[in-house]
Amino acid sequence: MIPSQALATLHRPGRIMHRILLALVALTLLIPVSVMAAGAPAHFGTRLSGQISSDGPRAVAWNLTLRHDWTQVETTIAKNDPSLSSATLRALLDYAPRHEQGAMQQALRQRLQKDPLAGLAVLSPVAHSPYSGRIICGGGEARWKHQVGPGVMATHDIVYALQRESCLKALRLHS
């Protein structure tokens, strides 16, 4: 081997290492920006409502699962975002993956505590649903049940009578 070729061979690993380090630095600068952008976009509820209207709840649920965006749905439910109707939320929750059900149930409990009528509106009237009054109201902690009970009792909207009755029954049964 000629000494100049040997010297060039020694410098190549340095160039490769330099390029790898440069790529890693670029990635570390880009990742925090994309994570912050994915955090909680403004008007998520409005955008989600539009997507459900156009694509249907099953397709939207599938996309949420692929993008790992169910935490944003959880936040939207808990905040009682008025841009998402209760019927729209119920339709979407029917397609939520099993591993997200616990988080969605907790968000529904928070919503029920903040606004009992809005919380009842999202509960499913179907008894065996994971989002029924029996499951949501029966699964909360004892302190939460004592806090939410009077608010649920004070609601008298005939439209949500089934949800109200199953919730009250679960609150009495499991308290």
Image (cartoon, grey):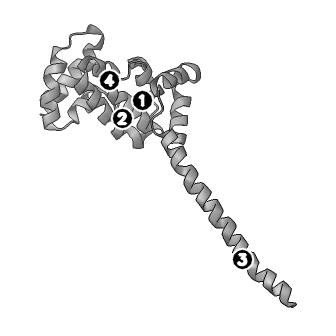
Q: Residue furthest right?
A: 2
**Residue bearing the label numbered 3:** 13
Measured Cα–Cα span from mark 3 to mark 4: 62 Å
Q: Is residue 18 above or below residue 111?
A: below
Q: Give whichever of discs 2 and 4 has the lower sequence position.
A: 2
Image position of 27 (left or right of 110)? right
Q: Where does the image place residue 49, in percent across and percent down from the top left?
A: 49, 21
Q: Give whichever of discs 3 and 4 has the lower sequence position.
A: 3
**Residue bearing the label numbered 1:** 93
Tell us which disc is closer to us: 2 or 3: 3
What amino acid type should be assigned to the residue bearing mark 4?
Leu
Q: Are marks 2 and 1 in contact (CB under 8 Å)?
A: yes
Q: Where does the image place residue 149, in percent across and percent down from the top left?
A: 15, 24
**Residue bearing the label numbered 4:** 123
Q: Residues within 10 Å of mark 4 (few under 14, many from 20)?
A: many
Measured Cα–Cα span from mark 1 to mark 3: 54 Å
Q: Kindly state the secondary structure of the residue where label 1 is placed.
A: helix
The numbered disc on residue 104 is 2
Toward which corner of the image does residue 136 lie, by quadrant?
Answer: top left
Q: Kindly state the secondary structure of the residue where label 2 is placed.
A: helix
Q: Are marks 4 and 1 in contact (CB under 8 Å)?
A: no
